[in-house]
Image: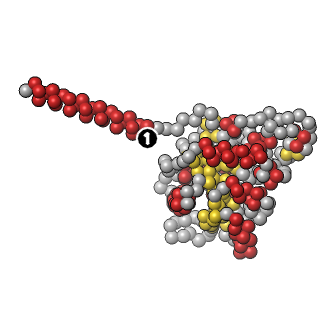
Amino acid sequence: MDLIQQALDKHSKFKQSASASLKKSKSRDKQDIVYTKTKIRTVDRDVMKERRVVAMLKHDPVAEVFRMLRTKVLKQLRENNWNSFAITAPTQGAGKSMIAVNLAIAMSMEVNQTVLLVDLDLRYPKIHWYFDLQVELGLSDYLMSDIPLSDVLINTEGYWLTGAETVKDDIPLSDILINPGFERLVLLPGRNRVTGSSEVLSGPRMKNLIKEIKSHYESRIIIFDLPPVLSTDDVLVSMEYFDAALLVVEEGGNTPEEVTKALRMLSGTQLLGTVLNKSETSNEHQGYY
């Protein structure tokens, strides 16, 4: 009888140990991301909704459109082993930055990857506006740091100009990155407008930045919000930095000729597809774009 009881006790201890190990393993799998260097900001989601950022909403037909777009984009990225893509438009006003923000949030809601949203529109940075963030340092500050101030003085309109002879202090990337309160999402925002942006984008500091953000996390998806492809050569200069591109087209705002020309300009990269924005006709999925 003692032998039977000992066997039962041993089995009970084994079950308890196995259960504890399983709980510990699940706890590790579901462990929240802890940001130690990246700044964490609380954003006003009501303001974001007013600015057409809706991807975080549940049971919302417009948010569902972005989740569907997320699924289609992620499928192509995974099939091709890509981890970065850019979002652009033929001309200004098509809504590319709004699409970029909503898609980044939707992707970050899926637990299989983290997302870095980079505001690479150096002439008209707007990502921070959609999150209602006051940005003290942006990508332009990082790209212009650790170089002679004779190349980067700022005038009263917020453009980088030429000027003094001293050297700006080097700004670490961690001082610029922001987590806007969405788990698995980090922003690399813009701030000042930059003249000569294509020269800055092709410079060694930008190339080093791309190398750093691509190698830091294996499961990270990087989304670049680019300027309009027909407005500047910045997109052509930046093509080596991303694996594919998504083109946002404004219904009634972009002509067939502009779309054709934009597609021709993007022929040097893989095209994930096009997003029709500001459409007056809802699609079969209760869409909005």
Colour pattern of the rendering: secondary structure
Report whether residue 263 is seen: yes
Q: Residue at x 90, y 44 (%)?
A: 162
| Image: 96 above or below 159 | below
The residue carrying mark 1 is 29
**Left or right of 275 on screen, residue 110:** left
| Image: 223 above or below 22 | below
**Left or right of 263 on screen, residue 16:** left
Q: Dividing the image into 4 quarters, which one contains the C terminus?
A: bottom right
Instruction: State the residue lying farthest toward the left.
Output: 1
Report whether residue 53 is seen: no
Name which residue type carries label 1.
Asp
Q: Considering the numbered disc 1 on the image, is that residue within a helix, a strand or a loop?
A: helix
Query: Where residue 181 sits: x, y (%)?
Result: 58, 41
Q: Which quadrant holds residue 180?
A: top right
Q: Dividing the image into 4 quarters, which one contains the N terminus?
A: top left
Front residue of 240 and 190: 240
Q: Residues within 10 Å of mark 1 (few under 14, many from 20)?
A: few
Query: Where residue 98 sits: x, y (%)?
Result: 65, 56
Q: Residue at x 84, y 51 (%)?
A: 195
Front residue of 12 and 60: 12
Front residue of 130 and 148: 148
Q: Residue at x 25, y 34 (%)?
A: 15
| Image: 40 above or below 49 | above
Q: Which quadrant holds residue 76?
A: bottom right
**Left or right of 115 on screen, residue 88:** right
Q: Which quadrant holds residue 261?
A: bottom right
Q: Residue at x 34, y 37 (%)?
A: 22
